[in-house]
Image (cartoon, helix red, strand yellow):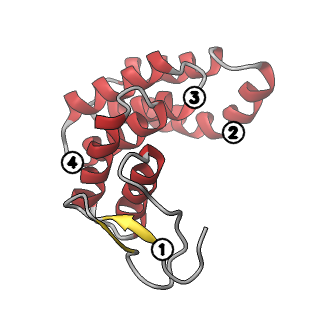
């Protein structure tokens, strides 16, 4: 990580200086999937610019369409944009690729709940629990129980 400035890939695919000189970010090359994911996360979560973040996720997806973390993040953006079918397909693909990654189950459950498909949402949360080790199940319960209560209301 560099402190003052760092290089990144611009929307047009060109290597450019960082978003702002004060940002700490990893150097990114044209084939660096994780670099694109991180830049997408920065734009989506910190710059509140889903459109630009989605462009970085799209580039990362071209390089590695089987990255469950990318699929999960991109699915969340699709859900926020109202693209529910695409979002659901991405969450499901992420779960298929890495059934032990609980965030994809949680994202799918949240999406299904917003679509008023509460039974399916609860099923996704149950699947998340049962796919984990006992220790992880205990950790997840503190996160999942409030969601189950909210969905059940």
Q: What whole-number distance in Å separates the C-alpha atoms at marks 3 and 1?
A: 30 Å
Say which label, 2 or 4, has the lower sequence index. 4
Q: What whole-number distance in Å separates the C-alpha atoms at marks 4 and 1?
A: 30 Å
Quick check: can you spot residue 153?
no
User: In screen coordinates, is 133 left or right of 147?
Assistant: right
Q: Closer to the observer: label 2 or label 4?
A: 4
> Are dots 3 and 2 in contact, CB under 8 Å?
no
Q: Closer to the observer: label 3 or label 2?
A: 3
Q: Judge by depth and name the residue closer to the eye, 134 or 96.
A: 96
Q: Where is residue 117 in the image (x, y as percent from the top left)?
A: 31, 23
Say which label, 3 or 2, has the lower sequence index. 3
Q: In this view, does 149 lie above or below 82?
A: above
Q: What whole-number distance in Å separates the C-alpha atoms at marks 3 and 4?
A: 23 Å
- Residue 142 shows which numbered tag? 2
Q: Judge by depth and name the residue closer to the eye, 83 or 21.
A: 21
User: In screen coordinates, is 4 left or right of 73?
Assistant: right
- Residue 6 shows which numbered tag? 1
Q: Judge by depth and name the residue closer to the eye, 35 or 140.
A: 35
Q: Closer to the observer: label 3 or label 1?
A: 1
Q: Position of residue 146 (x, y in %)?
A: 58, 40
User: In screen coordinates, is 95 left or right of 76?
Assistant: right
Q: In this view, does 144 lie above or below 134?
A: below
- Classify mark 1: helix, strand or loop: loop
Say which label, 2 or 1, has the lower sequence index. 1
Q: What whole-number distance in Å separates the C-alpha atoms at marks 2 and 1?
A: 38 Å
| Mark 4 crowd level (few <14, some 14–19, many ≥20, 10 Å Cα) | few
Q: What whole-number distance in Å separates the C-alpha atoms at marks 3 and 2?
A: 16 Å
Which residue position is annotated with label 4? Answer: 81
Q: Position of residue 29 (x, y in %)?
A: 41, 55
């Amino acid at each position: 990580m560099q402190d003052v400035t760092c290089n990144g890939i611009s929307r047009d695919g060109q290597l450019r200086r960082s978003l702002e000189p004060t940002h700490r970010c990893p150097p990114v090359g044209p084939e660096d999937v994780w670099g694109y994911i991180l830049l997408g996360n920065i734009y989506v979560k910190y710059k509140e610019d889903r459109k630009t973040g989605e462009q970085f996720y799209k580039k990362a997806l071209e390089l590695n369409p089987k990255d469950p973390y990318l699929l999960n993040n991109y699915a969340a953006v699709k859900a926020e944009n109202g693209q529910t079918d695409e979002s659901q397909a991405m969450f499901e693909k992420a779960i298929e690729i890495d059934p032990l990654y609980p965030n994809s189950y949680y994202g799918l459950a949240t999406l299904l709940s917003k679509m008023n498909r509460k039974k399916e949402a609860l099923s996704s949360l149950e699947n998340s629990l049962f796919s984990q080790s006992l220790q992880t199940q205990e950790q997840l319960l503190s996160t999942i129980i409030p969601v189950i209560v909210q969905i059940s209301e």
